[in-house]
Image (spheres, rainbow, N blue to C red):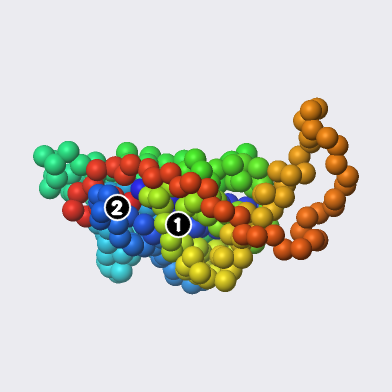
């Protein structure tokens, strides 16, 4: 399984993805699921993937081959509009699924993959698309300025509550990390390290990029602060009629530091059956 999230706000785009793949319960590996195609000053794209790893790798390889071929008339570098790029990526994805499916047609393994494509072409605003296994795609909207693939349910609440088009790029990035952290805490099929990339509107390049391990100070502080704030928020909710009233204790963060929050019981999700190349 996997979890990737892309966020579009007025200031730009945020991408975050885990790196855990599993072909079986005892075959867990780390693979990059975020792929960057950067042509500074002209265009920049980020593609994140969920699904069959063989299909994903073939798709990315074909996209790179076309982009590096000066004689290729249809590639990531040839289209003038981002929606045309999304349609082209969908075509490459479909053909890759057919190629992998021909090789694994009797194995009973799903060869489908789903992609998130985001980026900016010079002269246009940044954009974000989800490309489905059939090759069709959808874009974000002001009402839903994010897209998710993989194990999405655990990390969705904070995105629904916080994200708006006017959300700052840095706050959107923090929401993405908390969304990943919530998913990792609740599902063993999603795991560290986490890759994150940011594209600020108009930069036409990757503005910021990082890989976060569990012990990376920034990630550890976000993880601990979010857990502590949630615990304190529950204590400040309205009391039930049968409870004794209590005085206004103020923000508990102003008092002595609390002991670290005990992690909840982790729920092991049953991974989809994988072939030798694994499933993301």
Which residue in the structure is indicated by mark 2? 22
How much space separates mark 2 and mark 1, taking CA atoms?
Answer: 15 Å
Q: Earlier in the sequence, mark 2 or mark 1?
A: 1
Q: Is residue 207 left or right of residue 37?
A: right
Indicate the secondary structure of the residue bearing disc 1. strand
Q: Are marks 2 and 1 in contact (CB under 8 Å)?
A: no
Choose top left, top right, bottom left or bottom right for residue 253.
bottom right
Estimate how packed mark 2 is, as few (under 14), some (14 to 19) or many (20 or more) residues with alpha carbons within 10 Å.
Answer: many
User: Where does residue 85 sit, x and y in percent of width and height?
Assistant: 41, 53
Q: Nearer the viewer, mark 2 or mark 1?
A: 2
User: Where does residue 232 sit, x and y in percent of width and height?
Assistant: 72, 50
Which residue in the structure is indicated by mark 1? 17
At horizontal 30% and vertical 60% (from top left) the residue drawn is 29
From the viewer's perspective, is residue 207 above or below residue 84? below
Choose top left, top right, bottom left or bottom right for residue 35.
bottom left
Estimate how packed mark 1 is, as few (under 14), some (14 to 19) or many (20 or more) residues with alpha carbons within 10 Å.
Answer: many
From the viewer's perspective, is residue 24 above or below residue 173? above
At horizontal 23% and vertical 47% (from top left) the residue drawn is 274
User: Where does residue 183 sit, x and y in percent of width and height?
Assistant: 49, 49
Indicate the secondary structure of the residue bearing disc 2. strand
At horizontal 14% and vertical 45% (from top left) the residue drawn is 104
- Res. 213 in view: yes
- Residue nearest the viewer, comparing 75 with 136: 136
At horizontal 25% and vertical 55% (from top left) the residue drawn is 27
């Amino acid at each position: 399984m996997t979890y990737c999230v892309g966020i579009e706000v007025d200031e730009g785009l945020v991408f975050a993805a885990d790196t855990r793949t599993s072909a079986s319960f005892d075959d867990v590996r780390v693979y990059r699921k975020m792929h960057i195609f950067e042509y500074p000053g002209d265009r920049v794209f980020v593609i994140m993937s969920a699904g069959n790893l063989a299909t994903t790798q073939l798709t990315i390889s074909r996209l790179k081959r076309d982009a590096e071929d000066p004689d290729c008339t249809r590639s990531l570098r040839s289209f003038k509009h981002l929606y045309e790029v999304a349609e082209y990526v969908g075509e490459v994805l479909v053909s890759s699924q057919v190629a992998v499916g021909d090789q694994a047609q009797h194995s009973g393994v799903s060869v489908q993959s789903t992609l998130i494509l985001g980026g900016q072409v010079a002269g246009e605003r940044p954009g974000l698309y989800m490309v489905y296994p059939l090759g069709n795609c959808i874009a974000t909207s002001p009402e839903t300025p994010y897209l998710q693939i993989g194990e999405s349910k655990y990390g969705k609440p904070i995105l629904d509550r916080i994200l708006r088009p006017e959300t700052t790029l840095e706050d959107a990035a923090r929401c993405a990390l908390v969304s990943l952290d919530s998913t990792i805490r609740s599902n063993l099929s999603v795991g560290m390290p986490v890759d994150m990339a940011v594209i600020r509107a108009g930069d036409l390049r990757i503005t910021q990029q990082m890989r976060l391990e569990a012990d990376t100070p920034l990630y550890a502080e976000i993880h601990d602060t979010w857990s502590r704030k949630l615990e304190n928020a529950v204590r400040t909710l309205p009391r039930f009629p049968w409870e004794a009233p209590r005085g206004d204790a103020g923000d508990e963060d102003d008092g002595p530091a609390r002991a670290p929050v005990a992690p909840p019981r982790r729920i092991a999700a049953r991974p989809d059956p994988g072939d030798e190349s694994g499933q993301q």
